[in-house]
Image (cartoon, helix red, strand yellow):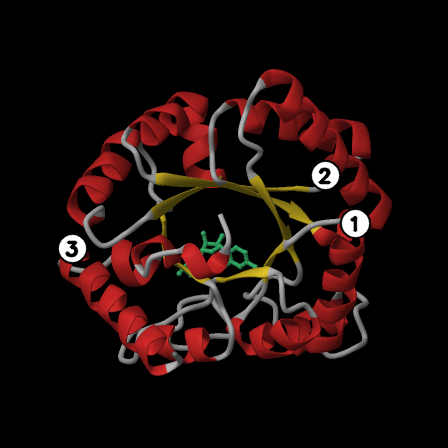
């Protein structure tokens, strides 16, 4: 799906970072009128597995399986094939797998989906986690600033054929300028007035859209809100406002 065809609702991705299928189902029921895509990450996948992914796909919403694959090329491609079989719309791999591994996964996945008659999910390359600050990055030996690290990793992914990236909204404008045709997904979004939790590089929904993000991943500001339906509807109208203003 190309970004310009997406509705505002498709651009709101809610991270179902909860412990059970029951809690996830409740959140989906409460928020699906405002949310086009739900993200299942490690916490929920480890507990509930592929059955929950299939259930969510059957609800007719977009599913983003965020397992952030990072492994040897053969293992990544094998996992990506299994993910494609689940019918999800997006899944993540770390760009730091390297250009060759990413290219092999992208090509192998396309071939597998063509053989099986499956719609290939969009493989999103994770650049630098939004929880990492400059100090954290220096601590793990990344001596450049986060933005150059993001651009370096994004370049590797782009040359490998990926056309989707995950990056903080603070890097979205630079990535948009460098790679105009890439679908940019940004976590680390905090509507004004909500706390930052453990996220270091944050932005409001409207500012992220103005910076060039195509879709926003939002977890705790919705999932831990007293009224998740109202929180999601508020974020959706902020996205709609930002899209209308940038036309
Ligand atoms: O609760 P919060 O809005 O911080 O949730 C953000 C979600 O996005 C989490 O599920 C987290 O794993 C994910 N994510 C992230 N930074 C990335 C990639 C994914 O925060 N670079």
Residue 218 % position (x, y): 37, 59
Q: Residue at x 74, y 49 (%)?
A: 161
Q: Which residue is mark 3?
A: 229
In the rendered structure, are the residues bearing label 1 and label 2 in contact, judged by CB atoms less than 8 Å apart?
yes
Q: Which residue is mark 2?
A: 106
Badge 1 residue CB within 8 Å of ligand 1: no
Q: Element type at marker 1?
A: loop
Determine the CA span between mark 1 and mark 2: 8 Å
Q: Which residue is mark 1?
A: 160
Which one is in front, 239 or 231?
239
Mark yes or no: residue 68 visible. yes
Number of numbered tags placed on the structure image: 3
Residue 117 % position (x, y): 57, 20
Q: Nearer the viewer, mark 1 or mark 3?
A: 1
Residue 31 as seen in the image, left or right of residue 144:
left
- Local packing at callout 3 (Cα closer than 10 Å; few below 14, some 14-19, many 20+) is many
Nearer the N terminus, badge 3 or badge 2? 2
């Amino acid at each position: 799906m190309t970004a310009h065809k997406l509705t505002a609702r498709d651009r709101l991705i809610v991270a179902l970072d909860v412990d059970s299928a029951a809690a996830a189902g409740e959140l989906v029921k409460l928020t699906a009128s405002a949310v086009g895509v739900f993200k299942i990450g490690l916490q929920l996948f480890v507990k509930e597995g592929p059955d929950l992914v299939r259930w969510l796909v059957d609800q007719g919403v977009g599913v983003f399986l965020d397992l952030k694959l990072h492994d040897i090329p053969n293992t990544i491609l094998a996992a990506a094939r299994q993910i494609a079989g689940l019918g999800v719309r997006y899944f993540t791999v770390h760009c730091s797998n390297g250009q060759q591994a990413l290219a092999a996964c992208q090509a192998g996945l396309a071939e597998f989906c063509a053989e099986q008659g499956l719609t290939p999910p969009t493989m999103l390359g994770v650049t630098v986690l939004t929880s990492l600050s400059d100090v954290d990055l220096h601590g793990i030996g990344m001596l450049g600033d986060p933005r150059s690290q993001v651009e370096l990793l994004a370049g590797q992914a782009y040359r490998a054929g990926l056309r989707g990236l995950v990056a903080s909204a603070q890097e979205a404008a630079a990535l948009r300028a460098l790679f105009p045709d890439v679908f940019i997904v940004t976590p680390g979004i905090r509507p004004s007035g909500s706390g930052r939790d453990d996220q270091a590089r944050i932005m409001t929904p409207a500012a992220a859209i103005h910076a060039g993000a195509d879709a926003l991943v939002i977890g705790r500001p919705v999932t831990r809100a007293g009224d998740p339906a109202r929180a999601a509807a508020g974020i959706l109208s902020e996205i709609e406002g930002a899209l209308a203003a940038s036309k």
